[in-house]
Image (spheres, rainbow, N blue to C red):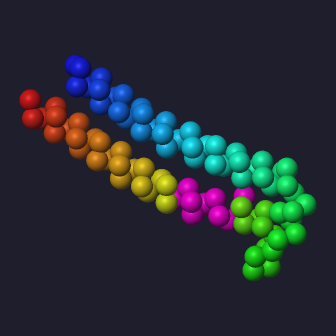
Amino acid sequence: MDQIEAIRKKQLKFALGVGIPYFAFVISIFLLVYLASEAVTRISIMGFPLHYWLVAIAIYPITWVLFIWYVGKANAMEDEIAEKVGGK
């Protein structure tokens, strides 16, 4: 039972280690756009204002890359659990 509890703590630490910085990153993007709106709206990339890029375009590829990486690591942890439980 101690192994299962150790694995659960490892999974929780990993989830919080990824989730909290990601949440802070998303909130900081919105805060940047809100607080520095004049400076951000003056910058244009390929005809779109920078704030469109930050909150509507760039966030999705970043989220998907992080999601794919996270799922790969989580699956590796699940495989580790299966080996430890099955190996007894």
Q: Does 54 sit left or right of 82 as displayed?
A: right
Query: At x 61% / y 43%, what residue is drawn?
Result: 23
* Number of marks: 0
**In this orientation, which residue lies closer to the viewer: 68 or 26?**
26
Residue at the spot 72% in from the left edge and 66% down from the top edge: 53
Q: Residue at the left extreme?
A: 88
> Residue at position x 22%, y 19% from top?
1
Position above or below: 12 against 38: above
Q: Position of residue 86 (x, y in %)?
A: 12, 35
Q: Quadrant of the C terminus?
A: top left
Q: Confirm whether the magenta stretch covers residue 57.
A: yes
**Residue 3 position within the rendered picture, expressed as x and y whole percent measured from the top left:** 22, 25
Q: Viewed as shown, does residue 37 lie left or right of 25? A: right
Write the residue at 35% across / 49% down: 73
Residue span colored magenta: 55-64
Q: Residue furthest right?
A: 38
Q: Measured from the top left, where is residue 87 in percent x and y?
A: 9, 35
On screen, residue 29 above or below 58: above
Is residue 47 shown left or right of residue 74?
Answer: right
Which quadrant holds residue 58? bottom right
Could you say which quadrant of the image residue 42 lies in? bottom right
Residue 80 horizontal/vertical position (percent):
22, 41
Q: Could you tell me what secondary structure mostly forms the magenta stretch?
A: helix
Query: Looking at the picture, does residue 20 appear above or below residue 71?
Result: above
Work out whether residue 79 or residue 51 is closer to the camera in this orientation and state it: 51
Tell me if residue 27 is in the magenta stretch. Answer: no
Q: What residue occupies the far top of the structure in this picture?
A: 1
